[in-house]
Image (cartoon, rainbow, N blue to C red):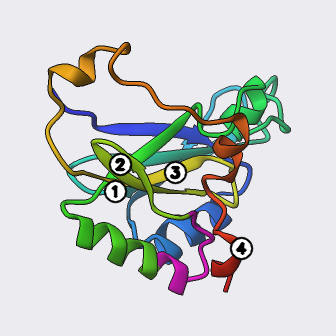
Amino acid sequence: MALDHLSFGTHDLEATTAFYQGQLGFELLIHEWILLEEGGRVDHAFFDCGGGCCLAFMQWIDVPGIATHYDTDINRGLGVPAGTFHFAFRCDSLQSLEERRLALISTGVVVGELIDLNPYRSFFFDDPVNGLRLEYTVQLRQPGAADLDPLRRQFRTNLALFGAAAIPAAGNRG
């Protein structure tokens, strides 16, 4: 069984499309209106993010009883550190991860530094429209028995790292 799609709310599907299609390069597969009997509509779009998986976004427009203002940033809305809720796109090699990072920077996406998250290497960035934390990652090795034991797999960090993971280092801000 595989994941087909993840769906999120947005207040601006046009800006969301500009980011996911224009800057990330995800093909727009479906754009539809869901017309509700109660009134209003849902502007709904699916973006191909590879491997048979899509990201979908829904903008609720003039639907009675549905809030027009809500926090699309899941982490902030729930009051948890940035990155608690995030989703990662897998690259097939370290070289493709590094190339993807440079490609995003060239389109104006603000991305964090490469981070070693053994057995992964990743970089993080934020969806500037909806506040979602995103990640590109590559698996450098297959997890083993030691990866199943939190007494053997520990590392120290701080809360500031969660917020700063999507921010470039001072010398790399363009």
Check if mark 4's residue and mark 2's residue have beta carbons within 8 Å. no
Q: Quadrant of residue 96?
A: bottom left
Task: Answer with left or right where residue 79 lies relative to residue 59.
Answer: right
Check if mark 3's residue and mark 4's residue have beta carbons within 8 Å. no
**Which mark is nearer the camera, 3 or 2?**
3
Magenta span: chief secondary structure: loop
Name the amino acid type tagged 3: Leu
Q: Earlier in the sequence, mark 3 or mark 1?
A: 1
Q: Which residue is mark 3?
A: 134
Name the amino acid type tagged 4: Ala
Q: Which residue is mark 1?
A: 49
* Residue located at (58% from left, 72% from top): 18
Q: Earlier in the sequence, mark 1 or mark 4?
A: 1
Q: Nearer the viewer, residue 82 or 48?
A: 82
* Residue located at (15% from left, 20% from top): 145
Distance between mark 4 and mark 2 Cα atoms:
34 Å
Highlighted magenta segment, given as a residue range: 104-112
Helix, strand or loop at mark 4: helix
